[in-house]
Image (cartoon, helix red, strand yellow):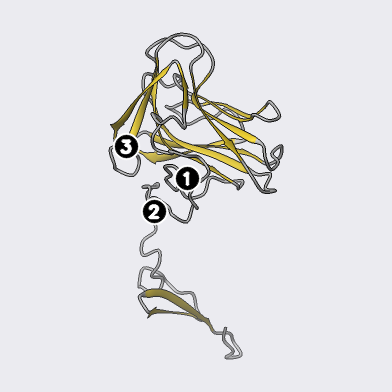
Amino acid sequence: NLALQSEDFSNASWVKGNVTVTANDITAPDGTLTADKCAATTTTFTSITQNITVTGDASSYTYSVYVKKGSGATEGNSFIFRNGTTGVNMVICTFNYDTGVTGIASARSEDVGNEWWRLSLTVLTGVKSGNVLVLYCGFTGGSVAAGVYAYFWGAQLVQANYPGPYAPTTTTAVNTGAIRSIAPNQNLQLYSDAQSLAEYVSDSGVTVAAYTWTGLSFLAYATSFGDNSAT
């Protein structure tokens, strides 16, 4: 995760223009009291941005952030993924907090529960090593009514064409292997890692066995064929 201070929009890493941040105002998607309320203080030039200089040859980048409705479904809902070096707004998203509609194919949303969404903006081209990428969050420099607000948490920028697991940051970038558990949509599949149980009905000729090795569970599948061979 190349975005710094991913859960603290009051930090100076996030540059605010006529926006005030109330830190740790409501419960975040991970159950902690760490999500921030961001509210416009005037009607002109309201913005929240972070500039990140990228390195390496990867051209695909994804900017993601967890968002929740504040004052309205279409208020504090503008997000831009910009290449500040080339001056190109690569993805512009106007998000609907009620429906999850992003309005553009290069932006996706995922319902993570409790009215929180994970919004992601992806670019596949247009980024080179040394470019400065600009993340706009909720407020993108336009005019809005004073008092308009929304909630944000867990910003992330990764070199990939998908958002990937969320990794919280403070003063330095963090590998997304250091993930934070976020409650996803409920898995309705029973015994998803225990296919040897009776809930799984084996077709003819398939045998499933479960094993445990140094604390790690795994499954072995043996398929028998008509000639008594097996794989």
- For the residues labelled 2 and 3, the Cα–Cα distance comes to 26 Å
Across and down, in percent, residue 138 comes to 47, 25
Give the image location of residue 79, x and y in percent: 53, 27
Q: Which residue is mark 3?
A: 34
* Residue 208 percent coordinates (x, y): 44, 78
Q: Which comes sooner in the sequence, label 3 or label 1?
A: 3
Return the residue nearer the eye: 176 or 182.
176
Q: Is label 2 in a helix, a strand or a loop?
A: loop
Quarter assignment of residue 30: top left
Q: Are marks 1 and 2 in contact (CB under 8 Å)?
A: no
Rendered position, 103 above or below 143: below
The front one of 19 and 111 is 19
Marks 1/2: CA–CA distance: 33 Å
Counting residues from the start of the chain, the first of labels 1 and 2 encountered is 1
Task: Find residue 172 and name its label.
Answer: 1
Kind of residue at disc 1: Thr
Query: Is 48 placed left or right of 30 in the picture?
Result: right
Q: Earlier in the sequence, mark 2 or mark 3?
A: 3
- Looking at the image, which is closer to me, 103 or 87? 87
Mark 2 sits on what residue? Answer: 187
Q: Does residue 196 appear anywhere in the picture? A: no
Q: Amino acid at mark 2?
A: Asn
Work out which residue is located at the far bottom of the displayed protein and give it: 228
**In this view, 145 is above or below 211:** above
Looking at the figure, which quarter contains the C terminus?
bottom right
